[in-house]
Amino acid sequence: MDLEKLLTDRLAPAFETVAGAPVDPVVRRSQHADFQSDAALALARRLGRPPRSIAAEVLERAEVNDLCAEAEVSGPGFINLTVADRALGGLVSALAADPRLGVPVVAEPETVVVDYSAPNVAKEMHVGHLRSTVIGDAAARLLEWLGHRVVRANHLGDWGTPFGMLIEHLVDLGEAEAAQELSMGDLDSFYKSARAKFDTDEAFRERSRLRVVALQGGDEATLRLWRLLVEQSERYFLAAYDLLDVTLGQADFRGESSYNDLLGPVVDDLGQLGLLRESEGAACVFPPGSVGRNGEPLPLIVRKSDGGYGYPATDLAAIRHRTGTLGATRMLYVVGLPQRRHFEMVYAAAAQAGWLTPPARAEHVGFGSILGPDGRMLRSRAGESVKLVALLEEAVARATALARERNPELGEAEAAEVGRAVGIGAIKYADLSNDRHRDYVLDWERMLSLDGNTAPYLQYAYSRICSIFRRAGATARPDTEISLAEPAERALAFELVGFGTVVDEVAGSLEFHHLAGYLYRLAAAFSAFYERCPVLRADGPVRESRLALCDVTARVLRQGLHLLGIRTPERL
C-alpha cells in the first residue's frame, strides 16, 4: 500500500541499469508533484554525465506508466512523479477491502517482553507512573496487533528493607483495620505513618529490623502479613489501571520477589565466568565502556557488602529468565531517561555473561518528565507529587462537564461514558503525541480542546463520520470502487495509504508521536474533504465512493487510536 515504496521499487532497477550498481532512488513527497526523486543529481559526478541526461534515461527504463499520470524531468535533474487518480483510487479501494487496513501480520513473530508501570507496594501511584504505563501499554498493543507474542511484565516493587516497618505498622494497627485502610486506596498515609514511627521510635525501629530478617528468612507468619500488603496494593493498582484503560492485569504482576530464588545462582554464575570483582566489600561487575567522569571504571553492584542483593542482581536475573525461560528476543524497558546509564550497564553485563546474545536484545524505552504550567515538575498545591488517580478523575470530570455543555442531549450514562473516553484519551494523547524523550507541560485547556493536535479533535473527526452514516441510514459497501476527482479526495487518499508505513516504522522506533502525528494529519485531511466534497448530497457512484472514503477513514482513525489506547465514541 506504500506509494513511496512502490515507486522506489519501480525506479530502483532503472537506476541500477543506468549506474551499473544498486542506487537508492530517494523518493520523497514533493510540493512540485506528488513525489520526487533526486538520486540523478548525486550520480552525475560519478558517471560523468549531466544529471538531466541520467534522469531522462532512468524514466525511459522505469515501468511507472500504470502508477503515474505524469513522470518528467524537472530542474537540474529531479524526477517528478504524479500518481494517476485511478492507481491511487485502486490502492485506497484495496485498503478498504482489507480487514487489517494494509498492515499485515509479521512473517516472523517474536516473543517480546514489555516491562512497564512498575509501582511500589504500599505506595500510591503518582503522575510519574503515567508515562511508563501509557507508553508501555501502547507498545504492547501495537506489537500484539502485528502478531508478536507479547509478555507484559509489571515489575512490582514488593521486596526490600522497608517491608519490615510496613509489616510492623500493619501489626500495630491490626490486620482488619490495616486491610480497611489499604482497601480505601490511601496507601500513602499508611506508608507515611510507618515511616514516621520508624524515624522516631527506637523500639519500633528494632522490631522492624527483626521483621526484615524474619521476612528474608522465610518466616511463614511474616510472609502471610507481607502477602496481605501486596494483595491490597495490587487491588488498588488494578483499579487505577481500569480507570486509565490499560491492558495490564493481575497475571502481569512480576514482583521483585519473584526473582529471589534466582539471585544466588546469578551471582554464582557471574563468579564462575570470572566477571566478579570485589570493591569495598561488594561483589561487582565492571561492564566494558562504563566509566565515570574522571575515566574510572564504574561498578555494577550485584551483591552488597552486607550480603544483600542490589537492583542490578534482580535486573540480571530477570534478563536471564526472560531470554532463557520465556524465549524473549526483544525486551523493552519503559523507564525514565535518568535510568539510562543503569540499563546500559545491566545490558552490557548480561551480554558479557552470555544471557543477552543475538537475536535477543534489550532496549531502554526512555522518556522525559511531565511539567506544570510553571515549567517545573508537576506538583500538587501542597508541593507533593500529584496522585495518578486524582489526575485521571480530574480529567474525566473536566471532559464530562464539557460533553454536557457541548451536547445537552446526552443522557447521564452516555455523558459519563463520553467524558471518560475523552478525558482519559486526552491524558494519553497529550503524552503520546509528544516526543517521549522530551519533557512536556500538562495543559488542561489545550489537551481537551476540539482544535489542534489533540485526542478530542481526532475523536470528533471519528464521531463526525459516524454521524454521516447515521444520517445516510446505510453502511459503505466493501466492494465499492473508490474514484478520486477532487484535490481534497486525493489528499485524503494519500494520507490513508500511508498508514501501514507509519505503523511499521513506529513498531521499530516506539516513537508514538509519529503515529499520533499521522492520525492528526489524516483527521485534518478528512476535515478538508468534508468541507469541500459533499457526501450525502452527491449523486450515485460519487456518493458511494465518498461514503467508502469516509468509512475507511473512520476505520483507520479507530484502529490508530486503539493502538494508542484511546477510545472512539460514536457521539460526542
Image: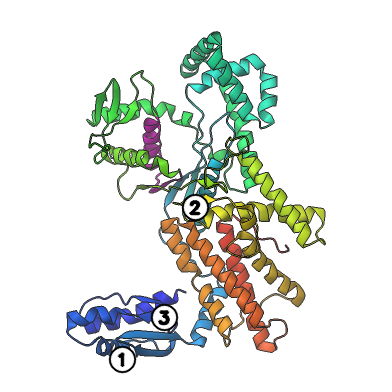
Q: Residue 349: give x, y in percent of width and height.
A: 29, 37
Q: Is residue 95 left or right of residue 236?
A: left
Note whether 259 is above or below 8 in the view shown: above
Is residue 224 in view?
no
Note whether 252 is above or below 96 in the view shown: above
* Mark 2 crowd level (few <14, some 14–19, many ≥20, 10 Å Cα): many
Q: Which of marks 2 and 1 is nearer the N terminus?
A: 1
Question: Residue at left 53%, top 11%?
Answer: 207
Labels 3, 2: front one:
3
How far apart are the two marked residues, 3 and 1, measured between alpha carbons? 18 Å
Q: Mark 1 points at which residue?
A: 60
Amino acid carrying mark 3 in the image: Phe
Please give the label number shown on residue 139.
2
Q: Mark 3 points at which residue?
A: 35
Q: Which of marks 3 and 2 is nearer the N terminus?
A: 3
Asked if the residue under mark 2 is in contact with the one under mark 3, i.e. CB atoms within 8 Å, the reply is no
